[in-house]
Amino acid sequence: MSLMFSISGLRGLVDKDLTAEIIYKYAAIFGSYIGPGEVIIGRDTRRSGLLYSQAVIQGLSSAGCKVVDLGIVPTPTLLFIVEKRRAKGGIAVTASHNPIEWNALKFVSSKGRFLSRHEFLDFLKQTKKNTHISISRKELNKTRELKNGIKMHIDRIVNAFKPVKERLSVGVDAVNGAGSIALPKVLEMMGCKVSRLNCRFSHHFPRLPEPRPVNITGLCRLVKEKGLDLGVACDPDCDRLALVDEKGRAIGEDKTLVLATDFLLEKKSGSIVTNFSTTALMDDIARKYHCRIHRTKVGEANVVSKMIKISAIVGGEGNGGVIYPTINFTRDALVASAVIVKLITERKQKLSHIVEQYPKYYMQKQKIRISRKKFESRKERLICAIKGKVSHADGIKIATKDSWLHIRPSQTEPFLRIIGEAKDKEQLKEYIRKVKDILS
């Protein structure tokens, strides 16, 4: 069974352990948890999305909720609309970066944010009280469709950042997902000339969903062949953004937050928040602007909770997720794309030149199948094998003078994630090898 229920939502393999009946049950319990009122829903382009959205509508309606359906929209758009309409909550039907055979529900509070840890634990208690819900055949409340959600979101972003005078040429790879219309559109509204790749709504993802360098080689070729200024790629629900420089080189999704933070702190000083798995370049940026950096457990809700607590200027995660509270408290590829365009045009520098000015680190991300029990039993061996400062706040993180390793069970896939970064590439490889040998 791969069904996973955590602060990151409810995820599973389509029609194996995540079925329409299970979707209905969790939607109905969520509707009871938040109470009667307006609930916003939306989805990405996965084949199962329409059926699962209908199950969500049934579940919410059975709890007395009035459903507003945005259709296929970026997840950050859904959160933006929840806050703007002051709805009771929302549900996004999307497995985000997971492979196409997965789908999921992401639960949104009335504040337009994913459930905090406290809210999730309350919701979890509710699910354990309601284990025998069956699908109701009674007439449903009428569902309202809202067609201009994307426009409202884009207008807010463009008004905040203002279109640029220098017209950049930008390649966009939206993996045929929910950002296929929105991501090119926001760039055009910002004054860019856009070349599209994989920008149509389709049940088929032409590449693996995560916009990691190994998965966006098509965009790299497009940028190089057309001589574009920039390439941007997102995942299926358009909350993560990865970049390709003008030379056609993917610079790594971890750099997106670094660049965005660099630009935003230049405009306004304040604290920043990211997770334990994000590049040490964020510490370098914090030192550059003499500001404080806070690190949290992995997971958007954890980062957002800390951002709210300290009134952070910007935050996010090293997977390409930029959170800019002025627009909304969620990772948002549309916001990130606007920030990067402003950065390049205001500094009057090529993206490659801006990146080359940062200290050089090497990062590796791997995942292996291993039970949590086995991982727990081998933690001490890992700590003994790699000497350094150890944190148990989220799995284990071991930091040495010029490197770090973060090893933790994923909340979104049945894997153990291993992420490491170092100034010495060979040293990093040796650390990763040691970790895999101990865990295998």
Image: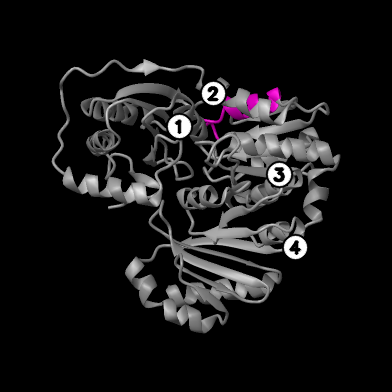
Determine whether the residue tagged by mark 2 lies in a helix, strand or loop: helix
Of callouts 1 and 4, the N-terminal one: 1
Cβ atoms under marks 4 and 2 closer than 8 Å:
no
Q: Which mark is residue 426?
A: none
Which residue matches tag 2?
A: 150
Q: Residue at x 34, y 48 (%)?
A: 120
How many dots with numbers?
Answer: 4
Structural crowding at the residue carrying mark 1, measured as other residues with C-alpha within 10 Å and reported as few (<14), some (14–19) or many (≥20):
many
Of callouts 2 and 3, the N-terminal one: 2
Cβ atoms under marks 2 and 1 closer than 8 Å:
no
How far from the left and from the top, in percent, is residue 275? 54, 57
Q: Which mark's residue is nearer the viewer, 4 or 2?
A: 2
Residue 388 makes an appearance in the image: yes
Determine whether the residue tagged by mark 4 lies in a helix, strand or loop: loop
Residue 249 makes an appearance in the image: no
User: Disc 2 and disc 1: Cα gap in Å?
Assistant: 13 Å
Q: Is residue 135 left or right of residue 217?
A: left
User: Disc 3 and disc 1: Cα gap in Å?
Assistant: 29 Å
How far from the left and from the top, in percent, is residue 409? 42, 62
Which residue matches tag 1?
A: 44
What amino acid is found at the position of numbered circle 2 in the picture?
Answer: Ile
